[in-house]
Image: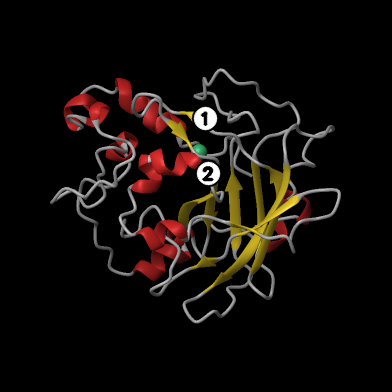
Amino acid sequence: MTPHPPYDGPTGRRTVTAPGAERSAPGAERSAPGATAPRPPGTPHGVPPYRGALLRHPRHSAVPVPDPEAVELTGPVFGVADVTDFERDLTRQHTGEPLGERITVSGRMTDRHGRPVRGQLVEMWQANASGRYVHRRDRHAAPLDPHFTGFGRCLTDDDGTYSFTTIRPGAYPWRNHENAWRPAHLHFSLFGTAFAQRLVTQMYFPADPLLAYDPVFLSIPDEAARARLVAAYDHGLTIPEWALGYRWDIVLDGPSATLFEDGAA
Ligand SMILES: [Fe+2]
């Protein structure tokens, strides 16, 4: 298990004080966060209103390797036996119950034809109900929860279905611009059959008013692609007397593919 779950906040915060960062993003502080930003020519991954993104995309051309498959054969791998069913429930990782609204999140991972992608490692990390990550760089003035770490993982089953039980995360400030708050979200990482195939994205919650102000979400120019990152409330997944249910399906390729952070947006 990753000792420190990845955390998206510091990148944005680090941008505020990084030498040259202000010069790299002229006008970023004044940009309207609610506006969908067109991508400047020559910077295919740079979206000025999302200041952290300026430090997160490649600045050099890809290095060709003679045999990519051979590289994957020697890269890090995980074993199916390493993932226990216990790890999908983020509310059971400590001796007590975490605070917040208990939820379940599940969906199917498929290819463009709706065929299930089986046995895939799905990792998920998130802030707690107060909008605070268990991470040394997170200085948000909100309480940590001693009963919540915010990291889980599972494998998709024969139907391509993954499932987590967790706590609905809180919004948190991230200093990207004046009064900047990230909408509630879950970070997802999907592994294929090798480390180089890792895909990373974020899932959002329906009817969140902060989506309209979030440069990360709005950095995706295609409205339909943005909508595919928003889960749906699913009463059939809601567990009586226990947890509200959300469905979020993941499509790996094709015209209705889920958008990933290294993708076209
Ligand atoms: Fe985050």
Residue at 26% x, 49% y is 45
Residue 206 appears left or right of 246: left
Question: Considering the image in quadrants, where does the N terminus appear?
Answer: top right
- Is there a contact, CB below 8 Å, between mark 1 and mark 2? no
Mark 1 near ligand 1 (CB under 8 Å)?
yes
Which residue does the numbered mark 1 point to in the structure image?
A: 172
Position in image of residue 187 (x %, y %): 53, 47
As helix, strand or loop, the secondary structure at mark 1 comes to strand
Residue 220 appears left or right of 79: left
Residue 169 appears left or right of 228: right
Question: Looking at the picture, does residue 87 appear above or below residue 11?
Answer: below
Residue type of the residue flagged with mark 2: Asp
Residue type of the residue flagged with mark 1: Tyr
Q: Looking at the picture, tell me which residue is in the foreground, 248 or 20.
A: 248
Residue at 69% x, 75% y is 158
Question: Looking at the picture, does residue 145 appear above or below residue 5?
Answer: above
Position in image of residue 246 (x %, y %): 65, 56
Residue 20 appears left or right of 102: left
- Judged by depth in the image, the label closer to the viewer, 1 or 2, is 2
Which residue does the numbered mark 2 point to in the structure image?
A: 208
What is the C-alpha distance between the residues marked 1 and 2?
A: 13 Å
Q: Mark on residue 216?
A: none
The colour scheme is: secondary structure
As helix, strand or loop, the secondary structure at mark 2 comes to loop
Residue at 33% x, 70% y is 67
